[in-house]
Image (spheres, rainbow, N blue to C red):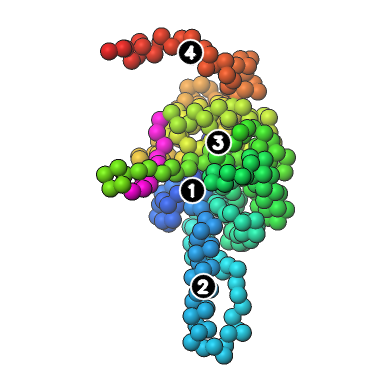
Amino acid sequence: MADLKTKYLGLELKSPIVVGACNLVADLDSLKRMEAAGAGAIVYKSLFEEQIQLEALEMEQGMEDYNDRHAEMTSLFPNLEHAGPKEHLFNFKKAKQALTIPLIASLNAVYDVTWVDYALELEKAGADALELNFYSVPRDFNANGKTIEDQQVAILKEIMDNVKIPVSVKLSPYYSNPLNLIKQMDETGVNGFVLFNRLFQPEIDITNEEHHFPWNLSTHGDARLSLRYAGLLHNRIKADIIANTGVLNGNDVIQMLLAGANSVQVVSSLYKNRIEVIAEMLADLKTWMDAKGYKSVSEFRGKLSDATMNDRFAYKRAQYVDILYNSKNIFETYPLR
């Protein structure tokens, strides 16, 4: 019988499927269904800087209103930088109590002090690990790539110096050289990398002439970028690798593990196919392992990574050249009309 156990961030997981941060995890019943379906761990929905600052603003305004009515009591209320989203932390604690599998906290901040403060708050709330969302939406013409990367590495180092639980970084693919940034971050001792953050993109409704933001769920084939980098990074960094985006079925899970990922994150498939699809994906993985004679995930993980393959071009530019030279094959599937 195939053993699906794996390790991620030093945590023992009963399976390589981790539920990624999403609104589904805010419901306790859904959390229990995810665990029952076989999820190895769950990432709780992100705590965003905007939540922190909005709550701070509301609290400060409330205090100021109160002071206006009772001016003689002004000195009793110090000016707070931020009060913190207590509701988020409260709900996180409830989720932690409802589960027996690891619960990972996701943090999405902007200011240095906020990252550290709330990393510590989430650690106190019982998080088994932290997932830091690092990305930078271009909006400043004067900020260069090195400045942005140096700031993110510095924030990571400071968090690593302050918390005792494992830390992972969820990156976007939009760096000049993601491999170089990952190497820099790996040298800090970070425990894992999530490849990659799926960012929401704007869209315009031409009928109403306004912006709208549709759900940006993954589709088949979206996993290829994560697959490439999982394959390139396996056995080349100390940190663990978790593949995210486009993992929709059991075949996608198997591909990511063969490339070298320690585990995978799923979100879109849960929305599209219900939470119990986790059990179906794991059943497919078990069937494949039994057919191949694999007793454990470690026996084949990374078997088709760049570090273990004789084909040095599998993850490199040469494959594009090969595709271009063999472009006639596409017309067999999609004939010209």
The CA distance from mark 4 to mark 1 is 38 Å
As drawn, 183 above or below 85: above
The CA distance from mark 3 to mark 4 is 24 Å
Residue drawn 48% across and 41% down? 198
Q: Categorize mark 3 by other alpha carbons within 10 Å: few (<14), some (14-19), many (20+).
A: some
Residue that carries the numbered disc 2 in the rendered image: 59
Q: Categorize mark 2 by other alpha carbons within 10 Å: few (<14), some (14-19), many (20+).
A: some
Which is closer to the viewer, label 4 or label 1?
Answer: 4
The residue type indicated by label 2 comes to Met
The residue type indicated by label 1 comes to Ala
Residue that carries the numbered disc 4 in the rendered image: 324
* 9 to the left or right of 41: right
Q: Which mark is residue 21?
A: 1
Which is closer to the viewer, label 2 or label 1?
Answer: 2
Q: Categorize mark 4 by other alpha carbons within 10 Å: few (<14), some (14-19), many (20+).
A: few
Residue that carries the numbered disc 3 in the rendered image: 173
Q: Secondary structure at mark 3?
A: loop
Contact between marks 2 and 3 (CB within 8 A): the answer is no
